[in-house]
């Protein structure tokens, strides 16, 4: 027992040290200008994409509910937070919290009726929801209609991004590893069996949906406060689709998979920015190849941990 | 212990159970036999709350189950071995068993129940870390039974536990069912293998197109001409 505790503690310390190192190194590189504006934008997109992919993975990967409306929740988060900071001139933290709550409430309102649907039907319902949000925003003059809101003060920085990513991953991982997580996974595995075990399947589906939406709202808030402008068109169903691609590529039900895929796709998109014509072709080809040779995604439903590195190391020796 | 009274269940326009009534007495093994599509699984799903009847009631320990959601019914002491086993295939054997005790909070007793299940099914103990999806059909059936027992049920609903198993394994499973019953759990057993089911049951019902057409002690039915002809092959 003592040994396990010691191991866990030492693992925790290693994690903290690694994270602190990443944070400091990147912050330093930003400060001295090794990472220029282009890299900074890529880094920001990367963090936002990680939050989106990890949160969608909770819904699609762990709970097994195919949702295609994630960009809708991101839009709500972005708009609510920008309205709070820009119109009411409150601090960013309040804006972000407001954005999260707004998206979570929307998730609840959408989730309760639609999560009774299964598979394709749920996908279509959530797709419709995403589009409704976009069309609604286009028609509300208070938030600028189709032109959106511009001139948003840039408040999102590396510290906010890094902190948000860590928070998202920690909270979602803790849910997955709790008894709630077991129940959520049982819903994915076999809904009927879960129900006869006494799991209230609808509740858990809604719970996962609301938490997923909440973090999509956080991503939206960070997005709005970095790119100066938000407009409804940014949050169309192609955005939802992009996030879904990351989740599927990384492996449904693997948080580290979602993170790796989000990083990979962001870097790929940035690297191919100069060749817009070939970009979509390469992007599509990679997806096709991954689906042929690794249909379960890069990570399957496994997680990459420090311990798994240790195992590989041990085997090699 | 369990009384099903005049229950009507519909799948859309299809009238699946037509005024079905049955009675399970404490400590018994009651079996429900009948052909494919007679409504056996529908009956179990209705008892466990997965399907809602249009009319009628189901009384268990003085409560009407029709008004109670499925996850609460488990808490009342009814657990189920579902048709086709339905183990959680990407979870380990141990995690599957823990899911069976999902509603229980008594940690110590849960642990001792787990030990009992491992004593009953040593194969599950050997493979407790293995993913349930990689078990053989017979092992999965044992896991499904063990998982249902982890809820510490007073009434165990079993849906076709012999389905798709080799004859020797079928025998083993039925011996286990008998033993579970002797240790104090009441069992409602749905089976197509009428011969095996009747050989361990106390009471039996024959179901045909949503109606009970025959009932009696298992012994009686075993020797009834109608049952012999229709289900036991002459």
Image (tube, coloured by chain):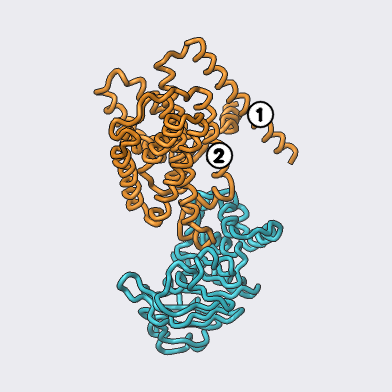
Residue neighbourhood size for the residue with mark 2, other residues' Cα within 10 Å, grouped as few (<14), some (14–19), many (≥20): few
Looking at marks 1 and 2 on the same chain, the residue that comes earlier in the sequence is marked by 1
Q: Is residue B90 above or below residue A12?
A: below
Marker disc for residue A13: 1
Chain in cyan, by letter, is B
Q: Chain of mark 2?
A: A
Q: Is residue A292 visible?
A: no
Q: Residue at x 46, y 44 (%)?
A: A104
For marks 1 and 2, give the one nearer the viewer.
2
Q: Are marks 1 and 2 on the same chain?
A: yes
Q: Residue at x 31, y 29 (%)?
A: A283
Q: Helix or strand or loop: what does disc 2 sit on?
A: helix
Whole-percent x, y for residue A45 in the image: 41, 26
Q: Is residue B31 above or below residue A133?
A: below
Q: Nearer the viewer, residue A51 or B193?
A: A51
Looking at the rendered image, the quarter that the C terminus of chain B falls into is bottom left
Q: Nearer the viewer, residue B154 or B119?
A: B154
Query: Which residue position is annotated with label 2?
Result: A171
Q: Is residue A149 above or below residue B132?
A: above
Q: Nearer the viewer, residue A24 or A80?
A: A80
| Residue at the limit of the structure toward the front, as seen here | A88
Q: Residue at x 40, y 35 (%)?
A: A79
Whole-percent x, y for residue B76 in the image: 58, 69
Chain in orange, by letter, is A
- Which quadrant of the view contains residue A274? top left
Asked if residue A153 lies left or right of residue A279, the reply is right
Marker disc for residue B75: none
Q: Is residue B67 above or below residue A175?
A: below
Mark 1 and mark 2: Cα distance apart in space: 18 Å
């Amino acid at each position: 027992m003592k040994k396990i505790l010691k191991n866990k503690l030492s693992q925790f310390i290693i994690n903290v040290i690694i994270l602190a190192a990443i944070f400091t190194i990147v912050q330093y590189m930003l400060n001295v200008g090794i990472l220029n504006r282009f890299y900074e934008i890529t880094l920001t997109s990367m963090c936002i994409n990680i939050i989106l992919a990890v949160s969608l993975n909770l819904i699609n990967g762990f709970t097994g509910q195919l949702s295609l409306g994630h960009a809708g929740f991101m839009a709500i988060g972005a708009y609510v937070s920008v309205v709070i900071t820009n119109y009411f001139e409150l601090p960013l933290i309040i804006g972000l919290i407001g954005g999260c709550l707004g998206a979570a409430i929307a998730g609840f309102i959408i989730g309760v009726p639609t999560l009774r649907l299964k598979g394709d039907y749920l996908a279509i319902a959530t797709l419709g929801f995403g589009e409704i949000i976009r069309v609604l925003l286009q028609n509300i003059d208070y938030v600028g209609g189709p032109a959106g809101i511009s001139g948003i003060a840039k408040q999102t920085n590396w510290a906010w991004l890094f902190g948000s990513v860590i928070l998202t991953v920690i909270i979602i991982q803790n849910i997955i590893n709790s008894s709630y997580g077991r129940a959520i996974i049982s819903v994915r595995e076999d809904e009927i069996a879960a129900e006869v075990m006494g799991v209230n399947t609808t509740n858990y589906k809604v719970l996962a949906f609301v938490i997923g939406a909440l973090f999509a709202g956080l991503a939206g808030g960070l997005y709005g406060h970095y790119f100066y402008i938000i407009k409804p068109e940014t949050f169309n169903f192609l955005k939802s689709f992009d996030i879904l691609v990351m989740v599927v590529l990384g492996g449904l039900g693997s948080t580290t998979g979602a993170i790796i895929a989000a990083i990979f796709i962001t870097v790929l998109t940035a690297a191919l920015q100069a060749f817009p014509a070939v970009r979509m072709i390469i992007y599509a080809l990679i997806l096709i190849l991954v689906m042929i040779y690794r249909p379960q995604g890069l990570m399957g439903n496994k997680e990459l941990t420090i311990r798994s590195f240790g195992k590989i190391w041990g085997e090699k020796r | 212990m369990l009384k099903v009274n005049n229950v009507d269940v519909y799948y859309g326009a299809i009238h699946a159970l037509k005024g079905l009534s049955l009675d399970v007495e404490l400590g018994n093994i009651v079996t429900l036999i009948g052909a494919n599509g007679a409504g056996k699984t529908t009956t179990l799903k209705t008892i466990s709350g997965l399907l809602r009847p249009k009319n009628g009631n189901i009384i268990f320990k003085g409560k009407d189950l029709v008004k109670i959601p499925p996850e609460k019914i488990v808490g009342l002491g009814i657990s189920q071995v579902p048709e086709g086993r339905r183990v959680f295939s990407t979870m380990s054997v141990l995690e599957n068993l823990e899911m069976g005790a999902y509603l229980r909070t008594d940690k110590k007793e849960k642990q001792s129940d787990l030990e009992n299940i491992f004593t009953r099914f040593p194969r599950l103990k050997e493979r407790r870390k293995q993913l349930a999806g990689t078990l053989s059909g017979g092992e999965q059936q044992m896991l499904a039974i063990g998982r249902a027992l982890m809820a510490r049920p007073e009434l165990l609903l079993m849906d076709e536990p012999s389905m798709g198993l080799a004859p020797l394994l079928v025998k083993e499973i039925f011996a286990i069912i008998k033993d579970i019953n002797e240790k104090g759990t009441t069992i409602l057993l749905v089976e197509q293998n009428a011969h095996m089911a009747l050989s361990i049951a106390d009471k039996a019902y024959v179901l045909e197109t949503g109606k009970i057409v025959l009932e009696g002690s298992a012994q009686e039915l075993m020797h009834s001409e109608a049952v012999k002809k229709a289900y036991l092959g002459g």
